[in-house]
Amino acid sequence: MMQVKLFDCEHEQDLEEEMNEFLGGLGTRDVIDIKYHIAAIGEADDEQIYCFSAMVLYVK
């Protein structure tokens, strides 16, 4: 059965760690696809907030 796992982090290193931990429990043939996205949101005080997200499609 195909499954989806979503990840959403404020820092790219956190996303990398969470994904590596999850992917470590899967076999290489279990992963179908990985989608990656970055969003930047400007704040009123000229500070930007980043959102790093990914979706893993895999077979369970």
Image: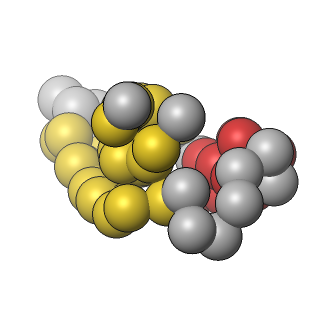
- What residue occupies the far front of the structure in this picture? 1
Q: Quadrant of residue 36?
A: bottom left
- Which residue shows up at 38% across the image and 61% down it? 32
Left or right, residue 16 beside residue 3 = right
- Which residue shows up at 23% across the image and 49% down it? 39
Left or right, residue 48 beside residue 44 = right
Colour scheme used in the picture? secondary structure
Q: Position of residue 37 (x, y in %)?
A: 27, 56
- Which residue shows up at 46% across the image and 44% down it? 59
Left or right, residue 2 beside residue 10 = left
State the residue in front, 42 or 56.
56
Q: Position of residue 33 (x, y in %)?
A: 34, 63
State the residue in front, 12 or 7.
7
Q: Quadrant of residue 16?
A: bottom right
Q: Would residue 20 be visible to someone looking at this image? A: yes
- What residue occupies the far bottom of the structure in this picture? 28
Q: Position of residue 44 (x, y in %)?
A: 18, 29
Q: Would residue 54 be visible to someone looking at this image? A: no
- Which residue shows up at 36% across the image and 47% down it? 57
Is 47 situated above or below 31? above
Indicate the quadrant containing the N terminus: top left, top right, bottom left or bottom right: top left
Q: Position of residue 41 (x, y in %)?
A: 20, 40
State the residue in front, 2 or 35.
2
Q: How many marks?
A: 0
State the residue in front, 17 or 3.
3
